[in-house]
Amino acid sequence: RVSGNGVGCDYKSILAAEDPASEDDVFDGDVTFTDQAALDAFAANGYREITGTLRIEGAGVTSLGGLETLTHVGGDLVITGALSLERLAGLDGLVSVGGDLIIEKNASLATLEGLDRLLAVTGLVRIDENAKLTALSGLESLIAVGGALRITSNVVLTTLQALTTLSADPGAPGNLGATAGDHLIVTTNPALVECEVLRPYLANATPPGVIVLTGNGVGCDAEAITNPPDEKDDVTLTDQAGLDDFAVSGADQVLGSLRIEGPAVTDLSGLGALLSVAGDVRIEGTAVEDLTGLEGLATIGGDLVIEGNSNLASLAALSRLTAVGGSIRIIDNQPGGSAARARGTASVLRAVPATAMMDEAAGFEDSTSAGGNLVIAGNATLETLVGLGGLTSVGGFVRIT
């Protein structure tokens, strides 16, 4: 962060003075690409600066390779409706945008990596309706946005953690919250469960702009961000009587983590009102045969761990689960599984004994995303993953052994 210094020592002046482009390196005006051939021909010139707007749109553009020399766009950078574009590699040299940054309606775009050197956007940043975008990875270097930040309708987006630098010091020159135009609009991202990065901005007693945080996953509303759950909000159920007592409350959400453990738990059917869990869900070493009772569970802010349940034969009750902010681990559900787990022989990092009783992976039909890893291990009679058909994105690795 560069601020509070004398004339010439702010980020804009430094960027303008750093290794300035020669006249031959500058394209004067706006440019729009709707097909790959035109982009490739332009890229061959090796321009370092575009003085106007750079617009990339349409299914004809499949790669931004060749634009690596570009360091500055003087107007807007708009990437819209580029239906075949999966990544932004090629913009690796881009340091600043003089207008708005708009990334919207790109059906195949899974990551923003390629914008890793981007430091400053003078106008607003808008990231809307990118159907496969799970995270904002690639924006970690962004330290200054002059206008609003709008992130809406990205259906599998799970985390905003890449914005840590941008939001770290609200009100600092150039940072989110510095001016009255710094509206924060994060809406209709149903899988979005990791929004702690916005806490410094929301903690500002008098935010300068409009704040709209609605329609996101568990933990991504203003109340949850400013008053995060702590351990006192956790629920641990170790026997059937305790679970039944909790069920009587009709609670539709757990503000912390939910842990269900031990062979004295035989039936989850009383949890039918439960819709969301802000932390982890851990079902470990129980005697349940299925997960009936969790049919309404839609979002989990942390990990989903199902481990060492020796009688478990079906995951079908999880069919409404749409977002898991952390990892999904389904491990060692087999005869003797809980004992094996107690001995420490089950591991998410290696194959486990191949003597499982899980007959199907039904469930997850409506699932859309996991922010972390997907691990299915030690369920050897699992013949099909058809029940995972709705899981469209995993933020980490996938391991099935």
Image (cartoon, grey):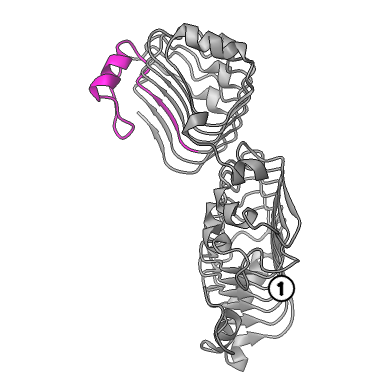
Closer to us: 328 or 225: 225
What residue sits right under mark 1 in the picture? 99
**Compared to 88, does 42 lie above or below?**
below
x, y percent for residue 362: 54, 19
Magenta span: 326-354
Q: Is residue 345 magenta?
A: yes
x, y percent for residue 230: 50, 36
Residue at the (69%, 82%) spot, across then down? 51
Report the magenta stretch's main SS: loop
Q: Is residue 303 visible?
A: yes
- On the rendered image, what quadrant is the C terminus found in? top left
x, y percent for residue 153: 71, 46
Toward which corner of the image does residue 167 lie, by quadrant?
A: bottom right
Q: Is residue 214 magenta?
A: no
Secondary structure of the residue carrying numbered label 1: loop
Toward which corner of the image does residue 261 lie, by quadrant?
A: top left
**Compared to 37, does 109 lie above or below?**
above
Residue type at mark 1 is Gly
x, y percent for residue 209: 74, 60
Residue at the (61%, 78%) spot, across then down? 72
**Compared to 186, does 324 lie above or below?**
above
Residue at the (57%, 31%) spot, across then down? 255
Badge 1 density bin: few <14, some 14–19, many ≥20, Cα 10 Å: many
Q: Is residue 268 visible?
A: no
Residue at the (63%, 67%) spot, across then down? 171
Toward which corner of the image does residue 278 lie, by quadrant?
A: top right
Q: Using residue 186 as the reference point, say whether residue 96 is left or right of it.
A: left
Closer to us: 91 or 237: 237
Q: Using residue 242 as the reference point, say whether residue 318 is left or right of it.
A: right
Q: Residue furthest front?
A: 205
